[in-house]
Image (spheres, helix red, strand yellow):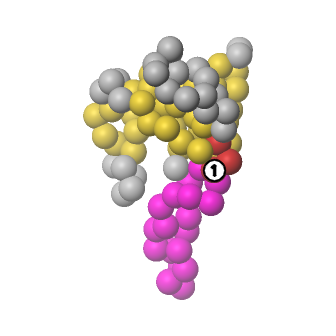
Amino acid sequence: MKIVSLQSVGLGTVFPGVNYEGINEPYVLKVSEKIKDGRGEELDVTVTEIGFGDMYHGMEMPKQDNTYFVYTSDGHIRVLPADKYIAEWSE
């Protein structure tokens, strides 16, 4: 099974809403889709893979059981805490 998306829990961007109340939009990362910045604008960077725990392709890093690794088209790996994101898994 593979992780196809992550959605933040309690994190994200707050946009103005009705009666000056803010609307919290969660931060979402999906494989094969572009990453959005804090204003909802797409960046020219695509998520290529999302891994969990020690799935970091043999890099010299300590084992991270409670961490998601988000690989992107710009060659970076974004490291996210597992207790702040919900993963969607697929075959």
Closer-to-camera residue (56/4): 56
Picture quadrant where residue 75 is located: top left
> In this image, 48 relative to 51: left or right?
left
> In this image, 27 relative to 52: left or right?
left
Q: Is residue 66 visible to the viewer in this orientation of the structure? A: yes
Q: Is residue 13 above or below residue 73?
A: below
Q: Secondary structure at mark 1?
A: helix
Decide: few, some or many residues near mark 1? Use Cα within 10 Å; few <14, some 14-19, many ≥20: some
Closer-to-camera residue (83/18): 83
Q: Is residue 21 magenta?
A: yes
Q: Is residue 7 visible to the viewer in this orientation of the structure? A: no
> Circle 1 is placed at which residue position?
84
**Which residue is found at the position 65% from the left and 19% from the top?**
2
Residue flagged by tag 1: what amino acid is it?
Lys
**Which residue is found at the position 61% from the left and 33% from the top?**
64
Q: Is residue 78 above or below residue 25?
A: above
> In this image, 70 relative to 85: left or right?
left
User: Residue 23 appears at what percent x and percent y?
Assistant: 55, 68
Please state, as top left, top right, bottom left or bottom right, where the N terminus lies in the image.
Answer: top right
Closer-to-camera residue (3/65): 65
In this figure, what is the number of numbered marks?
A: 1
Please state, as top left, top right, bottom left or bottom right, where the C terminus lies in the image.
Answer: top right
Picture quadrant where residue 63 is located: top right
State which region is magenta. Answer: 8-26
User: Residue 28 appears at what percent x and percent y?
Assistant: 53, 43
User: Residue 26 appears at what percent x and percent y?
Assistant: 56, 54
**Which residue is found at the position 54% from the left and 42% from the top?**
80
**Which residue is found at the position 46% from the left and 68% from the top?**
15
